Amino acid sequence: MSLLYPAMLLGVLGLAAPIAIHLINRARFPVREFPSLRFLTDTRQTNVFAPRLIDRFQLLLRLLAMLLLVLAMARFAWPGSEPAPRNLILVLDASASMQRHVTANGTIQAERYFDRAKALGAELLASEHAASRCGIVLAGAEAQTILPLTLGAAAAREALARAEPIDGEGCGLTAGLSKAIELAAGRREGCTQIVLLSDYRASALYPRKQADLERIAAAAEAHGASLRVALLDVAHGDRAGNVAVEYARLRKPEVNVGDDAHLLAHVVNHGPEAADVKVQLMLGARKAAHTKALNLAAGGEAFVELTQPINMSLRTIAELQIDLDAYALDDAFRVPLKVADLRRVLIVMGESDAVGPQIQALPGQPADTGEAAAGSEVDGGRILQYVLNPGRELGLAEGTGIHTKRILAPELRAEVLSKYDIVVLYDVSSLPAENLADLRTYVNEGHALLIVCSKHCSAPVFNRTLAAGTPSAPPLAPAQVGNEIALEPAASFRMEGQRHALWRPFVDGEGGDLSMVRLGRIREVRAMAEGTQSILFSTQGHPLMLESTLGAGRVLQWMVGLELDRGNLALIRPFPAFMWRVMDYLTQRHEARPADVVPAMQPAVLDASERAFAFLEELELGPAVPAGSEEPAGPAERLPLDAQGRVLLPPQRQGIYELRKPTAGGATRGGYGRLVTAFVPPAESSLKKAGPQEFSQAAGIPIEVLPPNAGASLVYTGAEAWPWLAALALLAYAAEAVSACVVNIRRSRERAGEEA
């Protein structure tokens, strides 16, 4: 026998009130007629405290009714064989591992462990007392109450049927238990029972927060023995294995046409036995030409690299697949693959340096004019054209993905600038106003301009045109040009302490050693425009490269020519890497952006600062268009862009998505977009079971871990006396009322007899 609300016994002190009221007696005296009131003394009679009890039976009935009411409110309970009312809260583990299919006798069943958990929960609800209160908590990405404590089990059964697991790592069983205890706060029944339905993986126990542990400890102290926590292990006895692709990445997020895509993957056998695994690569809907066979011991792992030639420009998904098993979510890993877009560079030559016999053929190449060169000098524009794509210039199959076109300055008016990524003005001293306006618009829209000032650049003319601005338009060139400077002794690049992103590979030596550069002649910088910064200096302190921004675009001004009489820059080994880095920087490819791969059901931040998303305030995220379809598989949502061009992705299920420019209502999808994939976190692939007492130790309170067929032992049985006590209290009050009525009638008759 126990009391659910022992504090209510303090109501016994209230029994003194009826006794005190009973002892207060109001004296009543009969009214007598008297001929003269002058001879009567004025007396007043008030309530007095009588030292004796009157109507003892009526007083006893009142005290009995109050005592029964106090005992009913204290809620006496005792053991019994019938189901008794209780608070029942079911906590469903909704992490991705609960989507694993049940395996019986080596055969994969259609039933998932989450389906089994829902079935066990329905059995518990079916045996509930009608007066029980039931609640449902879903331990998914976070602990979520899908049904608060509600009288009866009907609403709980409906909420249980609607529950579904997530594709990501769950919040942990401790968080689910804490949320259930929060629901039970202030509620008392004969028993408050929390039942967790989980596959009881060890990794599900240790995402813990101190606030959850404190709440659990406080509830255990407050409820005492009436709180019972149990866990039904829905995967009890399951020894089926699981081989998972825990992670994969491309060696280079962007590849050029003609290169090989290299996909590196980590494959782990989480099963208790050795497993033979076949690994294959998929590019979109096309399988790779070869696969790899692995034999992984129990608990073994392997790092696999698969390659596939890229023969066409495309944007697709590189997917590593293994043989399907009972847990299909981790049998494939998808990584967005982007074949680098062809970059087009327009080299505009000043007339004095682009014509005449001084242009000589490069080694192994015929001259552009078809005539023998009279001079011995190769102009800087030709060197630049050659180094940006030497394979193409030599007629080879290999290329750098950079296509160049070289023209004279007067021919610029016939070109459509928007089809080029970079325009190079090599020794161009002046341009017509129309061309200058076109170039300003071109740069403002997010393109890049490289200005090379070598020996044929006329400083006065350059400063009046390219380096001169107007009240309505800033100058196109970052700085005014001065005379040539002969360096004695020859200078090199000053790389010490260089922090600019353009030179990072050369500072740490990854891109080559630029200390061997020797510059004999450079152009002087006279005055820099507002907002211009020098990003490279010579060892003698001369500014060599200047940078400015114009709208969404970038302008670089290079004060060193590439001709061989200016220095040895074009002869050193790192020169190609140097120029490719400059091209990457101007087209915003200098920083290798990681592949857009995010964990499922977790928020993520993506860098969306590329030129294609310039001037946008929000982007659109939606499912990617399935193969063979023209429309996305589901609705899209709008995501705001911050000032740094970053976008916050809300939690997504496993799958392939596209981050793209927003489309107006009803408009057909199209234009630029980036593929984004969401993967199941590796923690959900490990099926290692927790120990019998491990959950109790992690949560800090006793928790029973039971097999799935032990649900019948969780039914709470017993009885409570409060309905009977409440009924007896009503009867006592009724008897007291009848007694009071009889006493009043008797007293009225006595007073009437006395008056007669």
Image (spheres, grey):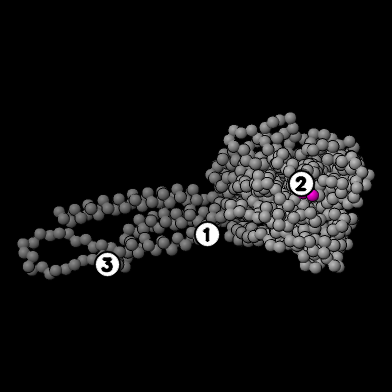
C-alpha span from label 1 to label 3: 37 Å
Q: Is residue 221 above or below residue 675?
A: below
Q: Residue most toward the left? A: 35
Q: For the residue marked with disc 1, what is the amino acid?
A: Pro
Disc ID at residue 348 = 2
- Total tally of numbered discs in the picture: 3
Please give the name of the residue rendered at 48% of the width and 48% of the height, measured from the top-left corner: 724
Disc ID at residue 48 = 3
Give the SS element for disc 2: strand
The percent coordinates of residue 118 (x first, y second) are 67, 40
Comparing labels 3 and 2, the label whose residue is closer to the camera: 2
Residue 347 on the magenta span: yes
User: What range is drawn magenta here?
Assistant: 346-352
Give the SS element for disc 1: helix
What quarter of the picture does the N terminus occupy? bottom right
Disc ID at residue 6 = 1
Q: Residue most toward the right? A: 364
Give 138 or 436, whichever is nearer the viewer. Answer: 436
Give 558 or 241, whichever is nearer the viewer. Answer: 558
Give the SS element for disc 3: strand
